[in-house]
Amino acid sequence: MSKRQTAIAEQPSWKLLLWVAIAGLVFGLIGFGEIAEDWLRVARNQLHRHKASGDIVLVKIDDNSLHDVGRWPWPRSDFGRITDVLTKAGAKRIFFDLTFYGPTNATDDTAFAEAIKRSKRVYIAVRTRAGTDREAPNGPSALPEIARYAHLGNISAHYNYQNAIWELPYAVPIGGVALPSYAVLLAERSGQANGTFMVDYSIDPKSVPSVSASRLFRGSSAAKM
């Protein structure tokens, strides 16, 4: 093969490499790799669809609850009542997926704190960071009067480009202590602080057992928890 033919044969290879590099740069800038990865993860979740274990019961603050109890937000004494009912029903652990920052009414705050103290199995949520920024600043902690008698868990989350939660931390350092996430506590697992794991969306959310909070206020426990 002549030098001219060799040069002509090599040109397409260099052009191909150049276009691959440009495409990689563009896809990197627009985050296409994350988009493609999310698509593949969604497809995998759909193929691996399965039901929840049933070990966790969700207490819903639904329309019936708002009608029976009243408008939101509820007094903290109402959460004390929920705590007492769930404890009496035999719940092994009680997780409040709510943040209790700052004081409200002293009577209500005290009633909730006393219920937590009686139960000895209540977990209170703390959100230290949320959003697309993994380095977001820490947020406020729970009201000390309430947190004193409760276990603390982190409900921080990392969102993807669609504002969907894809990653959760194993634990987040706050005040010199690695605060485990609710997901880790519920699964009774552990992990390195600041390490993250992907959310398993293959579990059918409709299969999670649930009960309306209004039933608890009426003194009707949802079977054994």
Image: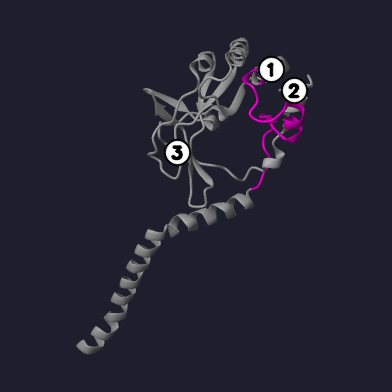
- Residue 171 occupies quadrant: top left
The segment highlighted magenta reads: 49-78
- Please identify the residue farthest to the front as the structure is shown: 105
Say which residue appears at 62% left-offset and 45% top-offset.
Answer: 202
Q: Position of residue 37 (x, y in %)?
A: 49, 55
Identified by mark 2, the residue type is Leu
- Residue 73 occupies quadrant: top right
Identified by mark 1, the residue type is Arg
Q: Are marks 1 and 3 in contact (CB under 8 Å)?
A: no
- Of tags 2 and 3, which is closer to the observer? 2
* Residue in front for this viewpoint, 60 or 171: 60
Q: Residues within 10 Å of mark 3 (few under 14, many from 20)?
A: some
- Mark earlier in primary sequence (1, 2): 1
Q: Is residue 1 above or below residue 69?
A: below
Residue at image mark 3: 196
Residue at image mark 1: 81
Say which residue appears at 25% left-offset and 88% top-offset.
Answer: 5
Identified by mark 3, the residue type is Thr
Q: CA distance from mark 2 to mark 3?
A: 35 Å
